[in-house]
Every structure is written in structure tokens, then in C-alpha cells.
Amino acid sequence: MYSPKSGVFAWHKQHFGDQTKVGYKDIIPMFKAEKFNADAWADLFARSGAKFAGRQSAARPAADGSMTLLPETADLHGGQVRTEEQHGHVYIAAWDKPEDWVSWAIAIPAKAAYQVEAVYSAASGDSAFDVVLAGQKLAIRAERTTDWFSYRHAILGKFEIPKAGIYELTIRAHDSATWRPVNIRSIKLARSP
């Protein structure tokens, strides 16, 4: 899309504008998966003889070393949890079942400590969930919010990452007894001394 010799270059310019002003990072949030059928996709891979089909990318740190994990890049696991967009924000929603969970692949460039922060809402009541990264777990009590669009910013705790690598950050219900639905707008890992 950035090479003038590519047919995609002209198509991009016609549909989105000049690449110097509107690039790939600007159109990523437009990608929606309304017609995506995971079963059909898996069948296609199986019929092709593929031995692997999975995630090929991971979130990487910004210039300041922090990472903001957004709903659009989360892997959603379960029958109900999904992303929605309202009031100008995309968020993880419909997370009513404690067996559903979410995850992100993240690339840690070197040994480091990260403070973990979340922007969430929990209108149905206090909820409990676990954030797991690099074999470490933070047990979180998410306090009730006044409604689904009154988001709370919370510092969840700290992770010590032992070495560079690709890791998976997961969020799961602590247990079914303490789980109440939550919406998540973002998870941030900020470098910590």
C-alpha cells in the first residue's frame, strides 16, 4: 500500500486518501469482523493441509516502553464475549460468562518491570478476575461502576518480566462465585523502575 508500483497504492489513495496522511495505523480500527466465520476459516486451513493456523503478531512497546492493549487486538475466548463500539469507544463487552476469557500476545524486548493498569466498567457489581503474565498472577477486585459507560481507571499491580520474549497476557474470571460482568476498554503496561 506504500509502494506506488502496487495496485493497492492507488486503491488506498482513492478510498482513504494520501498515504502520507492516512496510513495503515489509521485504517486498522476500521477493520470489523461482522462476517467472519471462525469455523469456516478453520475448515479451510484443515482442508489445505496446514499444520498451524494462529496468531502471527504481538503487541510491541511504544517509544516510552509502555504497551496499551486494546479490545480490537484481543483474542476473545468463549461463546459470548465480544467487542462493541458505543459512545466513540471500543470495548470488550458481553462478558457475562465466567468461563469466557481474553488474551493478548505481547513482545517484551528485555527484562523489565511493568505496572499494569486497566480502564473498565462493572455495572452489575463488584467482580473478581485474574490477570496472568509470565507465570505471575494478579488477583483483581474490580469495584462496581455506576453504569456501563462510567469507566474506572485502576492500577492493578506489577509484573516482573524475567527476559525478552513473546508472552501471553490473559484475563479470566477468578471464579464463578465472584464473577460479575465487566467491560474492558484498555489494559496498559507501563515501564516501572
Image (spheres, rainbow, N blue to C red):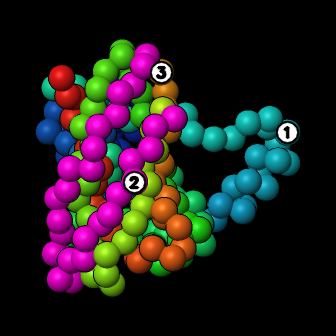
The reply, left or right, for residue 130 in relation to residue 88 is right
Residue segment shown in magenta: 135-163
Lower sequence index among marks 3 and 1: 1
Tell me residue 3's x, y (percent): 34, 25
The residue nearer to you, when weighing 178 against 134, is 178
The quarter in which the N terminus is drawn is top left
Q: Which residue is mark 3?
A: 165
Q: Amino acid at mark 3?
A: Gly
Tell me residue 65's x, y (percent): 22, 25
The quarter in which the C terminus is drawn is top left
The reply, left or right, for residue 25 in relation to residue 20 is right
Q: Quadrant of residue 178?
A: bottom left
Q: Nearer the viewer, mark 2 or mark 3?
A: 2
Q: Is 120 drawn above or below residue 117 in the view shown?
A: below
Tell me residue 149's x, y (percent): 20, 77
Look at the image and say whether residue 136 sits in the magenta stretch.
yes
Q: Quadrant of residue 189?
A: top left
The reply, left or right, for residue 174 in relation to residue 108 is right
Lower sequence index among marks 2 and 3: 2
Q: Is 132 drawn above or below residue 99 in the view shown?
A: above
Q: Secondary structure at mark 2?
A: strand
Residue under the point 53% across and 67% down: 175
Residue 139's disc is 2
